[in-house]
Amino acid sequence: MKTRTLLASSTLVLSALASLLAPSLVTAAEEAEEASLESLQAEVNQLRSIVPGQAFAMTQIAYNFSNLWFAAQAGNWPLANFYLGETRVRLRWAVRIQPERRLSSGQLALDPIAKALEAGQMAKVAEAITAQDHALFASAYTEMMQGCQGCHVASEKPYLKLHIPTVPAEPMIDFTP
């Protein structure tokens, strides 16, 4: 009987202790979670401050797209294919950096435009490279450039006018096959 009473008393004491400590344990857990969220937000803010903007990604697209022209003109089709792939990768990167453009009339989603460019004009450039056809390439390249210009206009940046490059973006590359 004494054991039961002692056990019951111990249970009551532990229960009382638990009810007293529970709020502080919850508060400590909430404080730790809040500190963790603040730490994560600080890290996100720090990363945002060092990630290049979309304008930088667009210069990378221009670099590769320009070199694509000279590789194809030299008949270096493997190099042209390389630069087309790099153009594609940088285009996707630019859209990940800034998936929407703020316009005077609202927002413009860039992913559908980029996907349409890839499936349409960029695919034609790839076909011309595969066919190793200079005339077909020049036509497809021009179409792709016009598609890019269309995105610039839709993004309210019509002053970003494109033209066939006259000098390679990278003077160190030997474009000959």
Image (cartoon, rainbow, N blue to C red):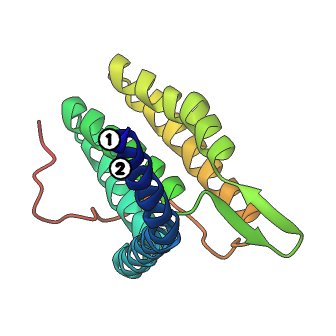
Which image quadrant is residue 44 in? bottom left
Q: Where residue 119 sits in the image (x, y, percent)?
A: 58, 28
**Which quadrant holds the N terminus?**
top left
Q: Is residue 159 above or below residue 113?
A: below
Where residue 109 appears, as percent x and y from the top left, is 71, 53
Quick one: 25 or 151, which is closer to the camera? 25
- SS at mark 1? helix
Q: Amino acid at mark 2?
A: Leu
Tell me what residue is drawn at x 60 percent, y 53 percent.
148
In the displayed structure, does residue 106 sit left or right of residue 113?
right
**Where is mark 2, residue-wise?**
6
Q: Nearer the viewer, residue 8 or 141?
A: 8
Query: What is the quadrant of the C terminus in the image?
Result: top left
Q: Is residue 59 left or right of residue 30?
A: left
Query: In this view of the protein, can residue 52 be seen by the observer?
Result: no
The reply to whether callout 1 and callout 2 are in contact (CB within 8 Å) is yes
Q: Position of residue 12 (x, y in %)?
A: 47, 56
Instruction: Name which quarter of the figure residue 106 lies in.
Output: bottom right
Residue 61 visible from this viewpoint = yes
What's under tag 1, amino acid-wise? Answer: Thr
Residue, disc 1: 3
Q: Residue at x 45, y 78 (%)?
A: 38
Residue found farthest to the right: 105
Estimate the spatial distance between the alpha carbons at disc 1 and disc 2, rounded to whole Å. 5 Å
